[in-house]
Amino acid sequence: MPETPTILWFRRDLRLSDHPALMAALARGGPVIPVFLNDEGVEMLRTAPAWRLGLGVAHLGARLEDRGSRLILRSGPAARTLLELVEETGAGAVYWMRAYDPTSVARDTEAKSALRARDVEAKSFPGHLMFEPWSVETKTGGFYKVYTPFWRAVKNREVAEPCATPSDLAPPDAWPESETLGDWALGAGMDRGAEVVRPWVRLGEEAAQARLGAFMAEKVETYPKTRDLPGVDGTSCLSENLSLGEITPRQCWHAGMRALHEGKDGAESFLQELVWREFAYHLMWHTPRLLSDNWKSDWDAFPWNEDERRREVIAWKRARTGVPFVDAALREMYVTGRMHNRGRMIVASYLCKHLLCHWRIGMEWFEDCLIDWDPASNAMGWQWSAGSGPDATPYFRVFNPDTQLDRFDKDRTYVRTWIAEGQADPPDTARAYFDAIPRRWAIASDDDYPEPIVDASEGRKRALDAYENRDF
């Protein structure tokens, strides 16, 4: 007697290669019904991440169609909607790839309980990370709070080889009804910005693999130096694809290890960055407050500005601070959906330290604007910059955006690429900012570039005075 169908619930794992849940569904026997849900996890997404997710889901659906399968789309709370699909299809199992943020954990726990109560096999599989957060422990049995010992603990661990892409996706003879992706309007909030950002998107696992291959062939050797130069194309840009599971960290890890064994020493820095991502998830799993509250509770008494209507915050959001490094980085984000890592540090430090604004303002703004948004990495980065997080930059370290520009963008390539004001013939990248931003901002390319809202040295002094008057 043929096996009952397996529902394969796709989430942030928009690929067919190195997909343990897919391989397990095929191994179980019987038809496999791929499903994507517009559920509570999707509903919480902000503008750019929701738009980018919609593109990824459409691409995965087309890829499944090319392979003789389909992606069934349904809306509603996950537990209820999966039970409805089980009833319609007679499925005997639901498989999915594991998630680690609190909202997803609660959703998945409820779904697993509801399915098992109906005698349906419900099983989650690892794959979004290389190391499950609970599997890395200190010698005393606790979790790691500092990156360097975490790196030492995992750098020599065996990472399983990636799974192959299956040749047969075992489609059913009859398909359940599907909703239409366009009706979900996942990209509605992008407005005219979608047209500006879309050419910068590298969509799907094929593009992600091409990115990885090109990086290993051409850039990884010089990565330790060029990764800090925002005006140089020296990074992998894989965060966009990792965030939606269009490529897996272990695919990246094994590519990096091969490069290292070939004598490309710069690959070790790339491997360390992959482990930094793991460290962020490790901390989010063990201390979910990382996403919402000061990780170091003694920062709760610090008098952060939390008023987003203040002139300084509005200027920061609109990339009109008068500080070229800050404005260039923010404009890069509005045009491409991403921001260079050095830019992220400068932008965050400026908001939290020069402007003394709460890191949550910046974290949530990035969550609106980044197509590579990742809950753990975003929160970890902002708390690191603010000084309130685990293994954070010391409170007395205040990046000077002017000297940082002299150090990492000496010839101002980065600034000229993204800031049009003051240039007789600015490049298309700089002009695109004015096409991407909301019309209500009423900013034009022929406007004068603003004076700094806070002078670099004045802002640093103000920050240090505020910190030193607090009892940390």
Image: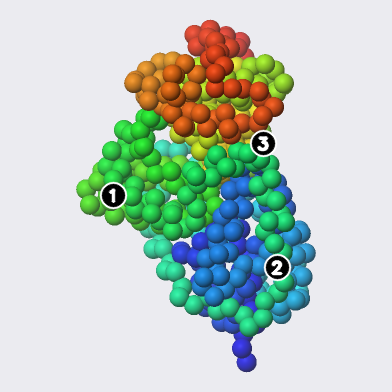
Quarter residue 297 falls in: top right
Q: Secondary structure at mark 3?
A: loop
Q: Is residue 269 above or below residue 309?
A: below
Report the side of 56 relative to 325 (left or right): right
The percent coordinates of residue 236 (x first, y second) are 39, 44
In the rendered image of this protein, does residue 343 appear above or below residue 144?
above
Marks 2 and 1, how far apart in space?
42 Å
Q: Position of residue 278 (x, y in %)?
A: 48, 47
**Which residue is tagged 1?**
217
Question: Label 3 sits on what residue type?
Answer: Ser
The residue positioned 43% from the left and 67% from the top of the image is 163
Label number found at residue 292: 3
- Answer few, some or many: residues within 10 Å of disc 3's Cα (few below 14, many 20 plus, some between 14 and 19): few
Q: Is residue 30 left or right of residue 78?
A: left
Comes first in the chain, label 2 or label 3: 2
Q: Quadrant of the C terminus?
A: top right
Could you say which quadrant of the image residue 173 lies in?
A: bottom right
Q: CA distance from mark 3 to mark 1?
A: 39 Å
Name the residue beneath numbered marker 2. Answer: 178
- Of mark 2 and mark 1, the one earlier in the sequence is 2
Q: Nearer the viewer, residue 67 or 389?
A: 67
